[in-house]
Image: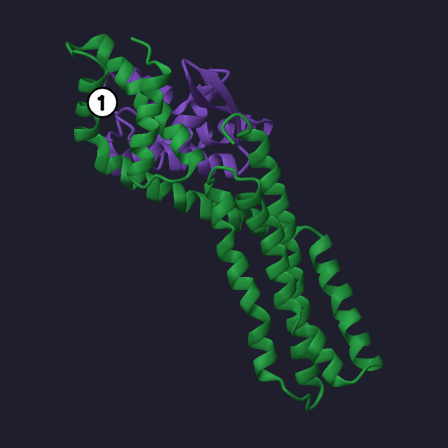
Amino acid sequence: MNLTKEHIKFIDTYLENSDIVYADIRMEMVDHVASDIEERTQSEDIRGFYDAFKEYMVENKVQLLEDNRQFIKSADKKIWRTLLNELKKPITPLLFLVLCIGFYLLYQNYNLETFINFTSIIPLIGCTGFILTYVVYQGVKDHKRFSVVERLAFPFLAFYQLPNIFLSRTKEINGISDLIWLIGGASLALTLMSVLIIISIKLFLRYEKRFKSIA
Amino acid sequence: MSNSKLYKGSLNTIILKLLNQHDKMYGYEITQKVKALTKGELNITEGALYPALHKLEAEGLLDVEIAKVDNRLRKYYKLTESGTKETVNKLEELAEYIKTMQALVSPKLA
C-alpha cells in the first residue's frame, strides 16, 4: 500500500518529536521509514499503517536515533571539508598576503593604538558575518532547521574567538617577532572569517536550491 | 550488516558499483538491492549506508537529486563524472584485494 500524505506527516512529526530536528535529515529518514513500512504492508500479514509503523519503530528506533547522530557528524564533516577545500584555493593565501600588507601599512602610517583598535574589531566582523548569514537565514526567513546551515554556527564561534588569542599576547610591540605575531594573527583571523562567510553563502544557496520544496 | 568488519571496507565500492549500474538510486533502494543480490547475506543498515553516501557526496563522487515521490520527498544519488572514474579504480582495487586474499586463503584457486 502507498502511504498517504497524512501517514507521511505522521512519520515526520513522530521523528521531529524524537529530537530529529533537522528537516534535511528527517526528509531522508521519512522516506526510508515510509519505504520500509510500504514493503511490510505489502509483503506481510500486517493490518495497516499504524501496526506496521509500530512494528518498525520497536525494531529500529534506537538505530534511527543513532543514525541522527551520524547524520549530524556528517554535516559537521561536510562543513570542515568544504572549508578546507576553500582554503586550498590560491585566492586564500593571496588574501592572507594582501591583509598582511594592509595591516603592516596601517601600523606604519598610524600609531600602535589605532592598529590594535582596528584588529579588535575583527571579532565584530565575524559576528556580523554570522548574523548576516546565520541569524537572518534561520530567523527572518523563518526556514526550517537544516543541519549544515545550523552547524555552521560552531566554526563561526571558534574563529570569532581567534583574534583574542593574538591580541591577548601583545599589548605592546617589542621587536619584529611581536609585530609578525600580531599582523599574522589578525590577517589569519580575517582570512578564515572571510572564507567562512564565503562557504556559508555557498552552502546556504546550495541548500536553498536543493530543499526548495520543503523550505 | 553480517560480517560487518569484513564488508565495512568495501561499502563505498559496493555503493559506487550499484550506482554505476543504475542511473540513480535512493537509500532504501540500495539496501534492498544489496540484500537481494546477496540473497540476504549482506544487510546494510541505515547507520552505515547514509554516512557513506554523504561522505561520497561531500567528496564530489556523488550528486544528489530531490524528487517528490508517493507523497514524500526522495533523495536520489547518482554518480558524477569523477565518481564514474573512481568506481573503475575502486573495482580494480577490490579485484586485486580478492586475488591477494585468495592467494593467501586458498592458493589452489589463485
Q: Is residue A179 above or below residue B54?
A: below
In the rendered image, the residue lying farthest to the right is A109
Q: Is residue B16 above or below residue A46?
A: below
Q: Colour of chain A?
A: green
Determine which quarter of the picture holds residue A14.
top left
> A139 and B107: which one is in front?
A139
Dot 1 falls on which chain? Answer: A
Determine which quarter of the picture holds residue B17.
top left
Q: Which residue is mark 1?
A: A53
Q: Is A182 left or right of B103, judged from the image as shown?
A: right
Query: Tag 1, which secondary structure?
Result: helix
Residue type at tag 1: Phe
Q: What residue is drawn where x is 45% and y is 26%?
A: B16
Determine which quarter of the picture holds residue B91.
top left
Report the number of discs: 1
Query: For the residue carrying disc 1, how many other residues have a C-alpha within 10 Å: few (<14), some (14-19), or many (20+)?
Result: many
Q: Is A108 left or right of B109, judged from the image as shown?
A: right
Q: Which chain is purple?
A: B
